Image (cartoon, rainbow, N blue to C red):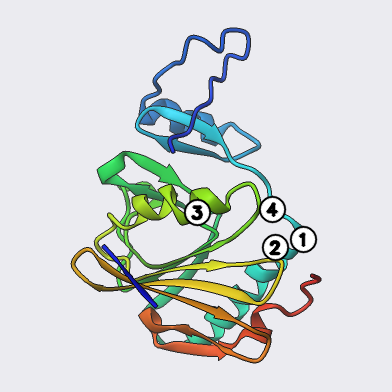
Amino acid sequence: MILLQAKPNIDIDIDTPQTQHIYSLDEYYALEENSDVRHEFCNGEIEEMTGGTINHNRIIRNLVRILDLAFQNTNREVFTSDLRLYIPEFKKATYPDIMVIEGKIMLHNNRQDEVLNPCLIIEILSPSTANYDRKDKFYYYRSIPTLKQYILISQFDYTIESYTKTGENKWLFEETKGENIEVNLESIELSFPISDLYIDVKF
């Protein structure tokens, strides 16, 4: 256990990559509403997001099933990457794989497609995004006042990385490995066998 105290770079005009346009949030929203792919926004810059694998989607499907069942008759709700998260401190908009919101949903500028207050964020690691998810993305996420836990899930073996907030600017890191162990989501008081998470996942 360890106690812990990227900017997108894309120019939509591919003919002139040397001239990078700084986008407003309104321009970004207009792009997203008319785009077949999702983009991240960070302080005026936009980057296209990559798609997921079959294992990636199976893990998300299993997670939603587990969380939906656990949240019956509670004030918690699970959301997938169809819903956007806005992080005011960094003027960043992104699509976490899984978010859990506890209590009232806080909307950004009353938008129905953008929220502010997850208590738990879960990302499925892929080779192209693993470093970003562990470093810059977690740096952005740590600025969210309501966030209590950040989970990273491998799609290639039975491995879970957990960062749990223990105090102001303090996060506890714990890695869980093995086919016969429990996943502990302390932020929502839920534990379940890791095998439930990997149903139908092929390594």
State if disc 3 and disc 4 touch (CB < 8 Å). Answer: no
Q: Nearer the viewer, residue 158 or 106?
A: 158
Report the side of 101 relative to 134 (left or right): left
| Mark 1 element type | helix
Question: Which amino acid, mark 3?
Answer: Asp
Label 4 or label 2, whichever comes before in sequence order: 4
Q: Position of residue 195 (x, y in %)?
A: 68, 85
Distance from disc 3 to disc 2, alpha carbons, whole Å, reads: 17 Å
| Mark 3 element type | helix
The N terminus - image quarter: bottom left
Query: Which residue is identified by label 2?
Result: 57
Query: Which residue is identified by label 1?
Result: 54
Determine crowd level at label 3: few under 14, some 14-19, many 20+ residues with C-alpha closer than 10 A. many
Label 3 or label 1, whichever comes before in sequence order: 1
Q: Is residue 156 above or below residue 27?
A: below
Question: Which amino acid, mark 4?
Answer: Gly
**Within the image, what quadrant is residue 145 found in?**
bottom left
Distance from disc 2 to disc 1, alpha carbons, whole Å, reads: 5 Å
Distance from disc 3 to disc 1, alpha carbons, whole Å, reads: 19 Å
State if disc 1 and disc 2 touch (CB < 8 Å). Answer: yes
Question: Which amino acid, mark 1?
Answer: Ile
Given this view, does label 3 or label 1 mark the residue nearer the observer? Answer: 3
Determine crowd level at label 4: few under 14, some 14-19, many 20+ residues with C-alpha closer than 10 A. few
Q: Is residue 169 above or below residue 143?
A: below
Query: Which residue is identified by label 3?
Result: 133
Label 3 or label 2, whichever comes before in sequence order: 2
State if disc 2 and disc 3 touch (CB < 8 Å). Answer: no
Residue 52 is marked as 4
State if disc 2 and disc 4 touch (CB < 8 Å). Answer: yes
- Residue placed at 35% from the left, 52% from the top? 139
